[in-house]
Amino acid sequence: MRIALVLVMASLAVACSSRGVYENVQLDRQNQCAPLPPGQYEDCMEGYTQPYEEYERERQELITE
């Protein structure tokens, strides 16, 4: 029972950490788009708007292939 609880807690910590890292990287990339002219800005931002859930689903699909 104790080991299972530790494993669940560790899994949650890793999941939260992965999401936080993903969101911070996305935010940093979006900030790098800011100085671009309007047309280039929109193109730049399109690449950095994928929600974490979609990213994780695609990542899991690639891992299982």
Image (cartoon, helix red, strand yellow):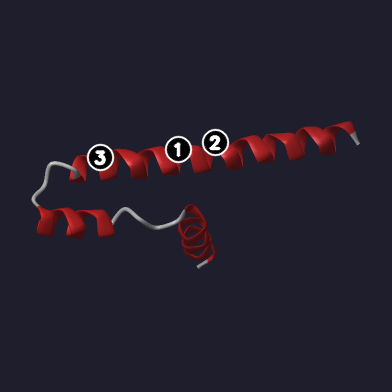
Q: Residues within 10 Å of mark 2 (few under 14, many from 20)?
A: few
The alpha-carbon separation of the residues under discs 3 and 1 comes to: 15 Å
Q: Is residue 52 above or below residue 16?
A: below
The alpha-carbon separation of the residues under discs 2 and 1 comes to: 6 Å
| Residue at horizontal 54 percent and vertical 64 percent from the top | 64
Relative horizontal placement of residue 19, taking residue 46 as reference (left or right): right
Determine whether the residue tagged by mark 2 lies in a helix, strand or loop: helix
Asked whether disc 2 touches disc 1, contact meaning CB atoms under 8 Å apart, the reply is yes
Q: Residues within 10 Å of mark 3 (few under 14, many from 20)?
A: few
Which residue in the rendered view is the most extreme toward the left?
37
Determine whether the residue tagged by mark 1 lies in a helix, strand or loop: helix
Question: Where does residue 7 sit, x and y in percent of width and height?
Answer: 75, 37
Counting residues from the N terminus, which is met first, the one under dot 3 or under dot 1? 1
| Residue at horizontal 16 percent and vertical 53 percent from the top | 41
Q: Which mark is residue 17?
A: 2
Residue that numbered label 3 is attached to: 31
| Residue at horizontal 25 percent and vertical 40 percent from the top | 31
Residue type, numbered disc 1: Val
Q: Which mark is residue 21?
A: 1
The alpha-carbon separation of the residues under discs 2 and 3 comes to: 21 Å
- Quarter holding residue 45: bottom left
Comparing marks 3 and 1, which lies closer to the viewer? 3
